[in-house]
Image (cartoon, rainbow, N blue to C red):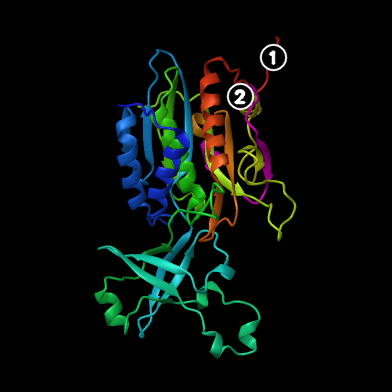
Amino acid sequence: MTQSSREPLSLILEHLRALVAATGPSGSEKDVVRLIVQAARPHADSVRVDAPGNVIAVRRAAVEGARTCLISAHMDEVGFRVLKIEPGGFLRLEKVGGLDDRILPAQRLWVRTATGRLGGVIGTKSAHLLTDADRVGFPAARDVYVDIGARDAAHARAMGVEVGDPAGFVGELTELGQGSGRFTAHAVDDRAGCAVLLALLEAGLPDVNLVAVFSVQEEIGLRGATAVARATHADLGAVDVVLALDMTAADDTPDTGSGHLRLGAGPAVKVMDASTVTHPAVRRGLLAAAGRRGLPVQHELLRGIGTDAGALQYLGGGVPTGAVSVPNRYTHSAVEVVDAADLQGAYALLRGFLEDLPGQDLRFVALDH
């Protein structure tokens, strides 16, 4: 087991660049699992993959009786499965996760077969052929098709395509503009969280046991985290506190305008969402850690979202639970955008929380009698 001396942000971006290159919609995260296990093994006392596919890496404290913090980030991305192979060789899709039909036409996809990945595009009618009816509205997901260059269905199958194969957006981590510190890719939600968690695992903290969970199937109902919460973990012992590390929807663009959550203004400390209300002691601890270190943070109240915290709060019959979120523009699209300063801020906030954890009061309420 080693400890990294590299600067956290460069390490985070290095991990993120590798992770977004993989294709891993919910339920087919195996390529991401391989990358996570490879990255985590040198820095953990134990790494295992459970039956649903969650990666659980444990780095133990150097002292006896240390508190244990479990932090979860999800590996899966929104994407597709091949629903049908048309006689002409085109593919029909079933959505996996919360994808917006408006963004689908003219997207590039990877289709992952049993033997590798195939490039494809979601077709869109040529501008020269549009009718007046085509110029209004947009096709539903059930009506779009993928062109993989196949001449017919037999050709598509000869390429290795089968019904049920996963598919996801094509892309690589790219900086916007020049020196903006803002990066775009698909699957930033939540591969960026995974990258931050890997950096925390590498750093190591001598006074706290860290359980890093890289979960599956978050985008379709927190299923991987639910399996972790319900299982018996003889290797973990008692978990004292749980945090989810995820992305959240920034609303600081001209088409939203409210600016509740802004890129570059720091990570958000979760107050509540559709899946959980943050435990008061955990929220106090996160805000105190930020205050002691002069870290800017935002406050997240967003009903239209959920994280692994919603499932993991039931771990062991109930554990103090909260979440740290990184603002992300254009969520669940092929062009999600994140600010490197917010990623670095999330790392610093979580590290500060872990450093303070040995002395934190984690009771829901202090009773005098």
The N terminus - image quarter? top left
Quarter of the figure with residue 200: top left
The answer to whether residue 241 is magenta is no
Q: Horizontal and vertical percent for residue 190?
A: 49, 47
Alpha carbon separation for disc pair 1 and 2: 29 Å
The answer to whether residue 311 is magenta is yes
Instruction: Using residue 42 as the reference point, say whether residue 347 is left or right of it.
Output: right
Please, is residue 108 above or below residue 223 in the view? Answer: below
Please, is residue 367 above or below residue 71 in the view? Answer: above
Quarter of the figure with residue 281: top right
The residue located at (71%, 10%) in the rendering is 368
Range of magenta residues: 291-312
> Few, some or many C-alpha atoms within 10 Å of disc 1 (few <14, some 14-19, many ≥20)?
few
Asked whether the viewer can see residue 311, the reply is yes
The residue located at (45%, 53%) in the rendering is 173
Q: Horizontal and vertical percent for residue 111?
A: 36, 66
Q: Horizontal and vertical percent for residue 262?
A: 67, 46
Mark sitting on residue 293: 2
Residue farthest to the right?
258
Q: Horizontal and vertical percent for residue 286?
A: 61, 28
**Relative depth, front residue between 211 and 192:** 192
Q: Amino acid at mark 1?
A: Leu
The residue tagged with tag 2: helix, strand or loop?
helix
Q: Amino acid at mark 2?
A: Arg
Return the residue at label 1.
Answer: 367
Mark sitting on residue 118: none
